Amino acid sequence: LLEFTLGGLVGVIQQDNSEVINERTRDFTDNGKIYEFDLSGQFFKKKDFPGQVFAKRRRAIEPRRFRSSLETTTTTYGANWQYIHPKMPTSLQFNHTTVDLNPFDPDEDDGQQLNSTLRFETGYRFHEYSGLSFSYDRRSIEQQPFELDFDTDEFTASHRWDFGLDHRHRLDSEINLFDQRGTFDIERRRWRETLRLNHSDTLQSWYVAEAITRVQGSLTGVPPIDESSYAISGNLEHQLYDSLATQVLGFYRTQEFETGPRIDRLGGQLNLDYRKKNRWGTVRAAYRIRAQREERSGGEQDIEFIDEQRTFRDPEPITLTAVNINVDSITITAEDRITLYREGRDYRVENFPDRVEIRRDPVGEIADGQTVLIDYVFTVGGAFDLDTLNQQFSFQQDFDFGLTPYYRLQRQDQTISPADATGAIAEDITAHVVGAEYDRSPFRLSAEYEEHDSTINPFRAVRLTSGYRKAFKFGATIDFRARWTRVTHRAPQRITRFLTLEGMYRHPITRSLTVEGSVIYRNESDTISRDNEGVDLDLSLEWIIRQTEVRVTYEFNQFDDDFADNNSSILFVQVRRNF
């Protein structure tokens, strides 16, 4: 009937912290109780309708670069239930998670994230090659101190049909209804048909037809955008042995807005990927050519770009080249679509006449190398045609001894008709990248030069990286990384130099005593603004004696830029005992 496991930790916690900021010392302590638990139970395990309930809480300390550490308490509980049936499998899942965020710095606001999800799935299998499926998802999100609060309901109905000789072809049909209410509202209706054809073992094709209606609000209070879009596309893929893969793509999409404007896009793309082993290793080459015509008609209209996926790579900014961007409408979230980042604290926006640049704040919540989702509203207007021809070529040789030289070329040609149209800016690009990587344990080295000629954002860049990682026989581990970049922009004239040094050493002195240390140095100089320099040092000693854990940690953070001069040091001692 019921099988369960239960584990828990109950005790007291005492943290003594001493912090120095701008020659001012603050001492503060945290004395209290700590609760951790992990409960999991299964019922009707051997029946056709098994279920599970669970509840757990975990407390952790997360280090942050150039800032004090963050204490997180994550509490999760929920239940799962299944109905196992060959014709009509069904499941019900519920999950609620609360994350309390408590920074060691008492001047920094505490935070909290709440996420509740409910999912119901069912369906009916007519036979092995045909079936219906239905799903319903409800989600509630709250986040403080960002004042993010919304509820969503999503319903999806789909049908799968395998047909043809040996049932090698497939037709998928889907209807999706999405409704969001709260901080900003979204209503979306989508119908999609996907046809996949396997002509042979080396030749496949698929075709997609899609219709979407959407009313989308935004976090900045921009009036809701009401649009309908219709699209069709086809893709043909051929595999020649293991060496050459060829893809041919064609597409057409039209967007119609309630206020009158219309955007039509028609185009095609060819992809060639070549891979061949030779006496030295493996050679790889790829070529892509994409042609597109965009036709706009009607009056002015606000359009929101939703979930544009971009990656921050220091020191280079993310560049948005759409015309007439409402910079106040820019919002950035993590890929989970829950964590919202704040301008002025996590990133900064620079507005130029022909583009918008977004730069990551080194002491913010966005990490270097992190991929984010960007929403922004821009205005389109007028009647014009925009023709784009984009070509990309890459070549590299992977030598067996660890060396990989490579070359990449990007070429884009754009034409606007009539030439005096104001609703878009044509950008011509010719970019050459030459580089080499060497990866042979324990060393990692790379060097790259890029000449990026553009009518909007021309620049030259030199990028050098090195790394060393080694695990010693006595258990210690060392990891060192260095990166240097120089970027020269020509519009406006701007030179950015960037250097980071990172080192980590971990040494288990005995089975119960471990010492670990890490240091990060960052220096960025800019001829226009935002010179900054920072050091982050973390030293920790962990001692485990039976059920008692003693952890002593020292953190030193120093970061100076155009906006602040922050110097802090924190020493905290944590004692935990399991009962």
Image (cartoon, rainbow, N blue to C red):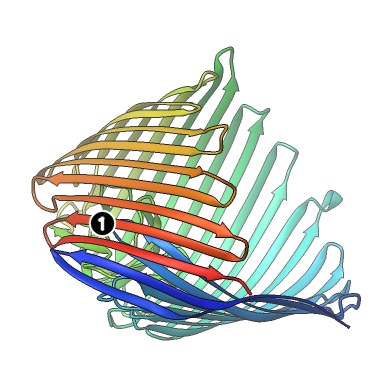
Q: Amino acid at mark 1?
A: Asn
Tell which residue pokes out farthest to the top in this image. Answer: 279
Residue sitting nearer the eye, 156 or 335: 335
Q: Quadrant of residue 119?
A: bottom right
The residue at which mark 1 appears reads as: 557
Q: Is residue 62 left or right of residue 275?
A: left
**CA neighbours of label 1 inside 10 A, class few (<14), some (14 to 19), many (20+):** many
Look at the image and tell me whether residue 43 can be seen. Answer: yes
Say whether residue 380 is visible: no
Label 1 SS: strand
Q: Position of residue 375 (x, y in %)?
A: 34, 67
Q: Is residue 274 above or below residue 477?
A: above
> Please, is residue 243 above or below residue 317 in the view?
above
Q: Nearer the viewer, residue 569 or 107?
A: 569
- Report the residue that reaches farthest toward the front: 545
For this rendering, which residue is in front, 187 or 93? 93
Question: Which residue is pictured at 27% across the width and 56% down the height?
Answer: 556
Residue at (13% x, 46% y) in the render: 526
Query: Residue 378: horizontal and vertical position, in percent?
Result: 26, 68
Q: Which residue is at a point 33% across and 79% down the rendered structure image?
A: 146
| Residue 251: image location, x then y, percent | 49, 53
Instruction: Relative to 350, say whether 43 is above or below.
Output: below
Image quadrant containing the C terminus: bottom right
